[in-house]
Amino acid sequence: MSVLIDNRQDKVEVDSRLEELTEKVVQKALEIEVEGDYEVSISFVDNQEIQELNRQYRNKDAATDVLSFPLMEFEETEENYEDEEEYVQEDRLLGDIVISLEKAQEQAKDYGHSFERELAFLLVHGVLHLLGMDHEDEQQEKEMLQKQDNILQLLNITR
């Protein structure tokens, strides 16, 4: 599994510790939720850029915390491979996750927990969206929150 990190903002410092946390969280979420090797791209942006993306792709003119852009229909991927060995070994582009570090910092303060915990939560949330999960109704939201909490607990990342 590979995690590509692109820092396109200058509001929050992105150091090696933050990059290591990002890689660890994304890799753990993938390890728990799916078999095989995937590549995920993470872009760190500011509120202005994520607002522009949110307006362009979701018709919502507001800054948000995380956006996910899946590059494949995840439910169908296993069915597309007749040879399971080929399925497990192929490195596939799962998608892109865009996170406003500025918004993550604001939310960490608002929720009373660390910036690292907020970033980890948003990363797991983004990965689950790439895997086809959503929170359009109450049951989906409950299931997604449970998965997020389980992954964060396994990483020993608490509020």
Image (tube, helix red, strand yellow):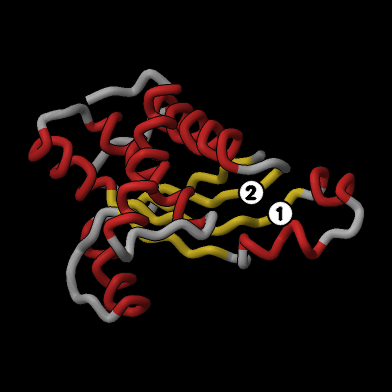
The crowd level at tag 1 (other Cα within 10 Å; few <14, some 14-19, many 20+) is: some
- Estimate the x, y position of residue 69 in percent, counting from the top left: 48, 64
Q: Which residue is mark 2?
A: 39
**Residue that numbered label 1 is attached to:** 92
Q: Residue at x 11, y 37 (%)?
A: 111
Q: Residue at x 31, y 53 (%)?
A: 141
Q: CA distance from mark 2 to mark 1?
A: 6 Å
Where residue 65 appears, x then y in whole percent?
26, 54
Residue 46: x %, y % from top left: 26, 55
State the image coordinates of residue 108 (x, y, percent, origin top left).
17, 36
Which of the two discs, 2 and 1, labels the residue nearer the N terminus?
2
Residue 62 falls left or right of residue 16: left
Image quadrant where residue 136 sits: bottom left
In the rendered structure, the answer to whether residue 20 lies left or right of residue 153 reads right
Residue under the point 81% across and 51% down? 87
Q: Which mark is residue 11?
A: none
Marks counted in the figure total: 2
Query: What type is the residue that disc 2 sits on?
Result: Glu
Quadrant position of residue 31: top right
Q: Are marks 2 and 1 in contact (CB under 8 Å)?
A: yes
Q: Is residue 75 above or below residue 158?
A: below
**Image side of residue 93 versus residue 14, left or right:** right
Q: Which residue appears at 34% of the width and 59% of the height?
A: 135
Task: Give, as a three-letter code, the residue at label 1.
Answer: Arg
Quadrant in which the N terminus appears:
top right
